[in-house]
């Protein structure tokens, strides 16, 4: 294998940590931020409207994993349901083939807003997956060197 292959991350090599919660996940999605702008037509400026940043919207961080006996995420979600809102921070590290982190995303102000249990089928042999969705207030991408 060429040396060039080690410079790129593979989407299946990642680690997620949410403060004290250390659990493996099979899939992560929702790392997105959308910016909205307001247009303003200034008098005397004829080459187009001015654009001003209006709002920023974060996606929902969606974490999928096989059902197991680790209950940290479920306990956190149960606490939210009874009004004990605790926001947490975390990181998602993307690794190259050698296991070195080449990119990280740090999220802050996260809390669970949805949990989905596994679909069960007696005739299948798939891993039972559960999904938890987190709202987050900030996302920062960090390039590792």
Image (cartoon, helix red, strand yellow):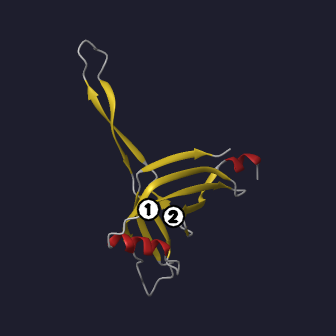
Q: Is residue 128 left or right of residue 95?
A: left
Above or below residue 43? Residue 15 is below
What residue is shown with label 2?
Answer: 27
Camera-nearest residue between 41 and 5: 41
Element type at mark 1: strand
Q: Position of residue 110 (x, y in %)?
A: 43, 58
The quarter holding residue 74 reads bottom left
Between the residue at mark 1 and the residue at mark 2, the CA separation in whole angstroms equals 8 Å
Q: Dot 1, crowdedness within 10 Å: few (<14), some or many (≥20)?
A: some
Please state the horizontal and vertical placement of residue 71, each as a whole percent of the image: 49, 77
How crowded is the residue under tag 2: few (<14 C-alpha within 10 Å), some, or many (20+)?
A: some
Residue at the spot 30% in from the left edge and 20% down from the top edge: 48
Residue 56, image quadrant: top left
Q: Residue at x 55, y 56 (%)?
A: 91
Give the secondary structure at mark 2.
strand
Q: Residue at x 46, y 54 (%)?
A: 108
1 or 2: tag closer to the N-terminus: 2
Residue 145 in the image: x percent, y percent?
Answer: 68, 44
Q: Residue at x 53, y 46 (%)?
A: 141
Q: Position of residue 4 (x, y in %)?
A: 72, 45
Q: Residue furthest bottom?
A: 122
Q: Which mark is residue 62?
A: 1
Pointer 1 with pointer 2, Cβ within 8 A: yes
Residue 114: image quadrant is bottom left
Give residue 54's mark: none
């Amino acid at each position: 294998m060429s040396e060039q292959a080690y410079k790129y991350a593979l989407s299946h090599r990642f680690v997620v940590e949410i403060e004290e919660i250390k659990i493996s996940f099979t899939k992560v999605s929702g790392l997105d931020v959308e910016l909205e702008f307001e247009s303003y037509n200034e008098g005397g400026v004829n080459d187009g409207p001015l654009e001003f940043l209006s709002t920023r919207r974060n996606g929902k961080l969606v974490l999928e994993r096989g059902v197991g006996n680790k209950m940290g995420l479920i306990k956190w979600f149960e606490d939210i349901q009874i009004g004990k809102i605790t926001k947490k921070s975390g990181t998602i590290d993307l690794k190259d083939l050698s296991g070195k982190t080449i990119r990280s995303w740090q999220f802050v102000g996260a809390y669970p807003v949805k949990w989905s249990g596994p679909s069960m089928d007696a005739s299948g042999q798939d891993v039972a997956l559960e999904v938890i969705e987190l709202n987050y207030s900030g996302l920062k991408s960090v390039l590792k060197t």
